[in-house]
Amino acid sequence: MRSLNDYIPALIQLLVLVYILIRLYQTNVWTGRAVSVIFFSFAIVSWLLSDLYWVAYDLLHPLTRMPFAANEIAEWAIFISLGVTLAELTGPVVAPIRAEVIGIVLFMTVNVALWIAWSGEWVQDIMTGIALAYCLIHLTRHMRQTGVLSRTCRIALGLVCLLIIAANAATFCVPEKYTGMLELTAYILMILTELYFTVRSVIALTGKGDRQVFVSLSFAAHAWCPISMYMSSGVFYNIEMYFFTFSALLMFTAIRREATA
Amino acid sequence: MIYAENILVCIAIPLIVSLLFIRGEVRRYLSAFLLGMAMCLLSAYIDGYLDLVTGMGGNETSIYLSPVVEELMKLMPLLLYILLLEPGERMLTMLAVAIGAGFATYENCCYILTSGAEDLGYILIRGLAVGVMHIVSILALSIWFVIARRLKVFSFVSVAVGVSIAMIFHALYNLLVSEPGISTMIGFAMPVMTAFLLFLLYRRLTSVSDDTFGS
């Protein structure tokens, strides 16, 4: 049986999502950014329903695995909706991102392979991978357009992704006494990267910079969360969950600024 | 064990005969209502097949998999209608309501024949909850299609996002009512509350959009 403490991250997230939905309801969606605001609202509704489903299932059937995780359908909807939100905000693309798209496809393919190795759910993991890749491609396009990451940062991010994947993949083939160390390395890298995007988002929020830069950073902070969460467990999962919740507030602020500008 | 096809034939024949004597919107409504009932039967067939293939068992299939199947089956006629005939906004929402109502009616008929109808109170609550749930999910979807067409973003992605939300809403309802107690009460209240929220949202969207779009 789970204790109340186990539900606190999810309950805080639910409250934040309800708050965001109420504020979105008060926003005039028929602005020049109508499509972005509506798809962002869809992402939040899907997220809320997904969380409610997870909490309800866990309360009704504690510590049992879902026969079919219907909330994953909502997660696909979240990623696709956020992808469309970003696509609408990006507009016509100038900078080519062929190399980045190849990188994302490879990164997501390895991620999906790891998820399948951990859970054994082929269809759901592949679908989640496709939806998340769709979101990441639009995010990368938006980030290139705003020039928010320098070339050095992009290479560093690529290396971090490579190290995280390598550390997680190595846990399957090294002796058991080393797996804890490898997992810890991956957790630290994931949390540091999350921290980097979150801090830069907060700086962009408080400064008087370009609104689109804030959009890029807040969505990047958000997109990094599921990647990390799906590879985490225990206390690290909860830390990522708090980042996830906070990034939702950042994204909402960014979208609201765009809609009311 | 019930003979679902026979029940459908029995209910549908008087309605099909009445189609000969009515015209206009009423005829379209009734046709969509019949289509909704047929879709419910097809969903039951697919659920049965999935039950066999996955080995999940009838109860778990109906709780966890049937929301996905049922929402997809309700979407099919609506989507075909939009793509082939490009109906007006009012007609689209009206037909969505008819499909949802037909689906819920037939599902309720089968439920009553399987589980009995002695307890009027429970039947009333269930009838209201299932009826509203099927209508709300497809009505919300049709309203989204109307908005998406207005904004010129009606595409595979917008349909996929809309139907995914309908699926998780339906799945949450099924999960809540699957266990007796407080969760069932919350589950039965959920469609009615959602209908109210949808009404508020629709009124707000249309009042603001009328100024913006001038329609």
Image (cartoon, coloured by chain):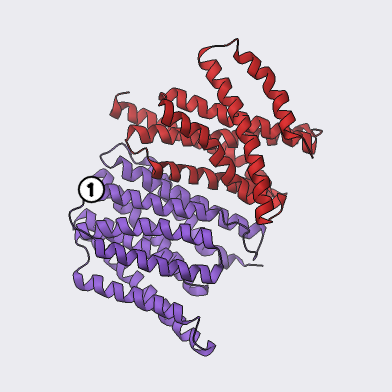
Chain colours: A purple, B red
Residue, far top = B21
How many numbered tags mark residues here? Answer: 1
* Quarter of the image where one finds residue A203: bottom left
Q: Nearer the viewer, residue B122 or B130?
A: B130
Residue A247 on image: x %, y %: 37, 60
Residue A86 against residue A107 in the figure, above or below = above
Chain designation of label 1:
A
* Quarter of the image where one finds residue A59: bottom right
Residue at image x 65%, y 56%? B54
Q: Quadrant of the N terminus of chain A?
A: bottom right
Image side of residue B85 versus residue A4, left or right: left
Residue at image x 56%, y 33%? B135
Residue A18 against residue A126 in the figure, above or below = above
* Quarter of the image where one finds residue A170: bottom left
Residue B1 against residue A185 in the figure, above or below = above
Q: Which residue is mark 1?
A: A91
Image side of residue B112 versus residue B141, left or right: right
Residue B47 on image: x %, y %: 65, 45
Is there any visible trace of residue A225 in the rendered image?
Answer: yes
Image side of residue A11 versus residue B52, left or right: left
Q: Quadrant of the C terminus of chain A?
A: top left
Element at label 1: loop
Residue A225 on image: x %, y %: 40, 65
What's the amino acid at mark 1?
Gly
Image side of residue B40 versus residue B143, left or right: right
Q: Nearer the viewer, residue A259 or B49?
A: B49
Residue A31 on image: x %, y %: 27, 38
Residue at image x 44%, y 50%? A77
Q: Count neighbours of disc 1 (C-alpha within 10 A) and say few if under 14, some if 14 to 19, many if 20 or more.
A: few
Residue at image x 28%, y 61%? A217
Is there any visible trace of residue A230 in the rendered image?
Answer: no
